[in-house]
Image: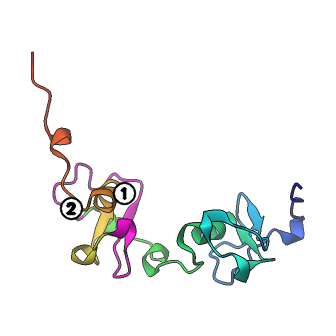
Amino acid sequence: ARKRPLEEGERKCSYDECPAPEKSSQFHQVHSGCKAGNRDWSPLAGQVLCNACYSQYRHRGTLVRSATSRELLTPDDRKCCFEECDNPTTSTRFIKIDAACSAGGRDWAEHVGQVLCHTCYGRFRDRGTLQRSRASRTKPLDP
């Protein structure tokens, strides 16, 4: 059975700490049998979540965002701390590493408090190092 669309008055996020409870491209009414993200949605059954809060819970299993995701970086802080970063100031996203970070199952302790660009953050999350692979550093030989 298809879910009925939410009425205009229902299109508001139920999460008290939602930063924009009425501004979302989509709202989700949580049903008791929801299995999205392989999470236990039963505590949220019946509530309406904006797309951002729904995605937060689906990915993280909590509606509480980390302190750093709420902390806006000033333009001066939007610079990657990795000295060998190819584009330290031109990323569309910068991430300040907090003590609770465990992305990719990595130990982020040496980077707590640092700001990384999206590329360097992803490299450390995926490979456990900020260093680029040798293949990406070598230039093709001239014929």
Residue at 29% across, 56% down: 123
User: Which residue appears at 64% of the width and 77% of the height?
Assistant: 18
Mark 1 neighbour class, 10 Å CA radius: few under 14, some 14 to 19, many 20 or more: some
Q: Residues within 10 Å of mark 2 (few under 14, many from 20)?
A: some
Judged left or right of residue 42, residue 99 is left
- Asked whether residue 74 is in view, the answer is no
The magenta region covers: 81-105
Position of residue 81 measured from the top left corner of the image (x, y, whole percent): 23, 65
Q: How many marks?
A: 2
Estimate the x, y position of residue 10 in percent, counting from the top left.
85, 71
Assess whether residue 94 is covered by the magenta stretch. yes
**68, above or below 141, in the image:** below
Question: Closer to the camera, 22 or 65?
Answer: 65
Q: Tell me which amino acid carries mark 2.
A: Phe
- For label 1, the residue is 118
**Residue to which mark 2 is pinned:** 82
Question: What amino acid type is highlighted by mark number 1?
Answer: His
| Tag 2 secondary structure | loop
Expressed as whole percent of the image width and height from the top left, the position of residue 130 reads 22, 59
Above or below — where is 127 with respect to 30? above
